[in-house]
Image (cartoon, grey):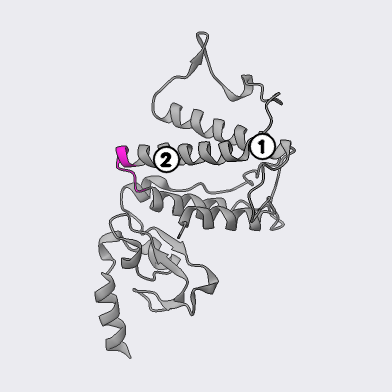
Amino acid sequence: MSDPYGSKVREFHEKFGLVVRDTPDTGFWNERQLRVRLMLEEVLEFAKAAGVMVCMEARRVQMDRLWIGDSAETPDLTAMAHELADVAYVTHGTAVQLGIPLLAVTAEVHAANMRKLGPDGKPIINAQGKVQKPEGWKPADVGAVLANKTIPVVQEPPDMGPAERCCFCRKRTRMWTALHDRSPGQQVACCEVCAKSHVPKDVPTKAEWFRQEDARR
């Protein structure tokens, strides 16, 4: 089963020296604590962006006021997997309800995350294990994606065969469009330079792209 989100996150973890496992495991306590903290941070940031205030006992919930510690409960890997799926399901449902092209937005955020390297080309990681933003880092331009001002692209795995030619400049590339109104089988090759200089309506259909390539051979 193809998992475009998982492959991007795995690429990020591998590049920044974060933990990657190939078999199910509850992980260490500090790893679980960090994942909970990261998820809570993102939920509270989403609430703020959505104009929703989250309170506990009439006080606004803020990350710097939360204590995240050990529990008497033994980690349950099956339950953890189930709840993670529920979180992902709710996240995707929210995107569907809001009309957000989540695959395209994820591609833009992933590209920005992969730029989180220090001046020496190495990641900056704090004591809790979280990757930090280096000075001069440029965040993802999600607004441009939502406004259809750029073409969202994703990188195909290196084991997918030879690189294809960009549908615009014809340079070899492993980047493919991630247009939300097309199925995975209808995406076309598009290099990162052309993705930034064209808009989604410029992208040819896969049939048109094939005809262009046949005509140039």
Which residue position is annotated with label 2? Answer: 89
In the rendered structure, which segment of residues is drawn in magenta? Answer: 96-101
Res 114 visible:
no
Q: Nearer the viewer, residue 118 or 18?
A: 18
Quarter of the image for the N terminus: give it. bottom left
On screen, residue 199 above or below 123: below
Q: Position of residue 148 (x, y in %)?
A: 31, 52
Q: Secondary structure at mark 2?
A: helix
Q: Quadrant of residue 200?
A: bottom left
Magenta region includes residue 137: no
Q: Nearer the viewer, residue 32 or 56?
A: 32
Residue 11 is left or right of residue 205, and the answer is: right
On screen, residue 41 above or below 158: above
On screen, residue 188 above or below 43: below
Q: Position of residue 80 (x, y in %)?
A: 58, 37
Q: Which mark is residue 67?
A: none
Which residue position is annotated with label 1? Answer: 32
Residue at left 44%, top 19%?
53
Mark 1 Cα-neighbour bin, 10 Å: few <14, some 14–19, many ≥20: some
Residue at left 31%, top 48%?
147
Q: Quadrant of residue 97?
A: top left
Q: Nearer the viewer, residue 108 or 29?
A: 29
Q: Position of residue 30 (x, y in %)?
A: 72, 37
Q: What is the CA distance from the residue labelled 1 to the residue labelled 2?
A: 20 Å
